[in-house]
Image (cartoon, rainbow, N blue to C red):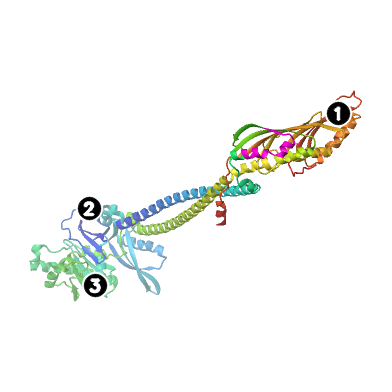
Amino acid sequence: MRLKAGVIVVGVLIIVQFLMFNYFLGQDNQTIDLALKDLEGRRQQLVAEKADLQNRIKELKSMISAIPPWLLSGFEDPETGFVEFLDFLQSDALKNVKGTVTVKSRDFTQEPIPLHQTAFSFRYQFTTTYEAEKFLNYLLFQERYPLQVTAFKAKKSETGVVGGDFSVDLLIPARLQLPLPSSSEKVESR
Amino acid sequence: MSTRILSVSYFEDSYQYLEIDKQSGGYFPRPAQQAGTVEALLSACRQADEIYINATMPSALYEWENFPKVAKKYVANVVMQDAREKVGEGATLQVQYKVLGEVVEAGVAKSRIAYIAVQPEDLTPLWTTFGKFGKKLKAISPISVALASMVAKIDRPSENFTIVWIGPNSSMIIISSPEGVVKVARTVPLGMPREEEVSDPEALRVFSEDFGREFFMTSTFFKQEFREGVPNLLYFLGHTRLADIFGEHPLAGAPADVRFSLAESPAKGLSESQGSELAHLIANIYLPDEFSFLPEEAAPARTGDIAYRVALAAMVLIIIGVGFWTFRLNGVKQDGLAQYDKQVAAIEKLQKEVMTFRDDVDRLQPLVGWKKFYEETFQNRPAWNMVFSELGLLLPENIIIDEFRVTPRRGATGGKVLSEMSGSIKADNWEAGLEVLRDFGTKLQSSPVFEVVDVSYAPEDVQKITKVFNFKIRLNLMKRGFAHAS
């Protein structure tokens, strides 16, 4: 009788232990499920971010490809550039239109890139458009000095001579950062 | 692991008991209690695993009868009816029976059944005393059944045999079938001679003669009842001196084959004399399944085994089921962990890639400013070098331009620079002047250098003979090489 009772007790204990173990296993599985759901959410977020970044890199590369290499190849030191520009102005093109130039202000700006900004004001005269356009072409359509026209005016006088005024900003980049080799390309190639 | 068996014998209104250990090697009796009290007996009952009881049961009626064949479920009723007829109608009886086989009586097949009917007064004291031990109680049988069964199982006689068991104050004469089924049992009011009588030959002779008469009466009753000869085998059990007594004073009418012990010891570790003296207690371990008068309360003890087995089977099934469930859950957990590791590895890889892409974006991002710088300084330059010649080309003779003014704005202008020109038109009338201005505006609009935004036109002095009309045109200066949609 004692043996039977013992067997029953041992059996019940085994069942209870199994049930407890199963309960804890069930809890573990629930925790793992939740963790997997979290991980899946995180993974999807990363996949979306990766796709966004890839598109952004593509856009940036496309944008960069539109910048001519000579612009990125480098600029002189800002002071040197400024002096060189002054030398550039000592030309016949300016003299032919009886031009005068005034340096107005010098400034430093961060937008769109760090720039040394020098404002120049020009005054010139012409009777034929050829003279004026030769001067404008010489000054504004060179590929060395970044200029931005800030004002432009031409007025005809009673004598038929046209007086022109215009202002430009000489914008010399403070520094040039060339992009390093793309590590994403390495990742993609892998 | 041993089972502790308590064997109890009730006769002459007192209990004797013997504790026996049932082990794999056999039955091992413990030292017998010489003067056991009821309290000691009950204490032994509490400690025992199984209890077997026999008693003289003077009211017991032993019958072998042929009954008409009936369905099994009606046999008990038929036997009970027969017992009542023999004991007396209205008697409250407890009946146990055993179907021995079939016999043909007058050409009709009948069931040969042996039964024992006991009146309640023989059972009530036992049930009252031992009923509370319910499930431990395994059997309550007449002492005759126990002794006959023991002899049959140990000696395996080939024919009917007689047992004479002599107690202190009374004795039993039992005639049994070779299978141990009692045919006749009588309680005889003759006990073992006292110590002083044993040494008195005359007393022993008288004892033997008295017993011989009882034996003769029993044998005669057996012969009449069963129409068989007196058994040729006689066992004397109950005391070690019986051999001496009946050796010197043979029992009258005794058969030739008289034995005072069994062929082998009924339990381990017993001497021949102990085997004889404790025969009534040892016999309990040889009790047959039949002829047990257990009280109703003890009945579940037998069904208890079934219940235990069912419970055990159910428990095993549950353990298997739960074990399988555990196995599955554990499998799910392992799969989950493997998937978790896989996901973590994938996410780490993704994180690395994303970090690399972020670095690239950070590295390339400053070039956006360079692009803007390029647009503002070089790319989107208006055609300054064509403004005057283009105007000269498009300008009609009767229009004079007084002023051309440009106010460039920084920021996103799409390469267009808003400008304004003002001047005057000489014309005969307002409409003619307007027509000239329209013509000029059309030409401006078709030029790649200009894009007309709006025009204002007003007379300067209508009193003059030569009419002069002032105009003002707001227009966009297009970037070089850019053709607008005209």
Q: Quadrant of residue B326?
A: bottom left
Residue B90 falls left or right of residue B44? right
Residue B261: x and y in percent read 18, 70
Camera-nearest residue between B303 and B426: B426
The amino acid pointed to by label 1 is Phe
Judging by the rendered image, the residue that carries numbered circle 3 is B155
- Find the magenta span and give its range: A82-101
Residue B102: x and y in percent read 37, 72
- Which of the two discs, 3 and 1, labels the residue nearer the N terminus? 3
Judging by the rendered image, the residue that carries numbered circle 2 is B43
Number of the front mark, 2 or 3: 2
Judging by the rendered image, the residue that carries numbered circle 1 is B469
Provide the secondary structure element on which disc 2 rests.
helix
Residue at 47% across, 49% down: A30
Q: Is residue A91 magenta?
A: yes
The amino acid pointed to by label 2 is Ser
Camera-nearest residue between B14 and B70: B14
Provide the secondary structure element on which disc 3 rests.
helix
- Which of the two discs, 1 and 2, labels the residue nearer the N terminus? 2
Residue at 25% across, 56% down: B48
For the question of whether residue B53 can be seen, the reply is no
Provide the secondary structure element on which disc 1 rests.
strand
For the question of whether residue B266 can be seen, the reply is yes
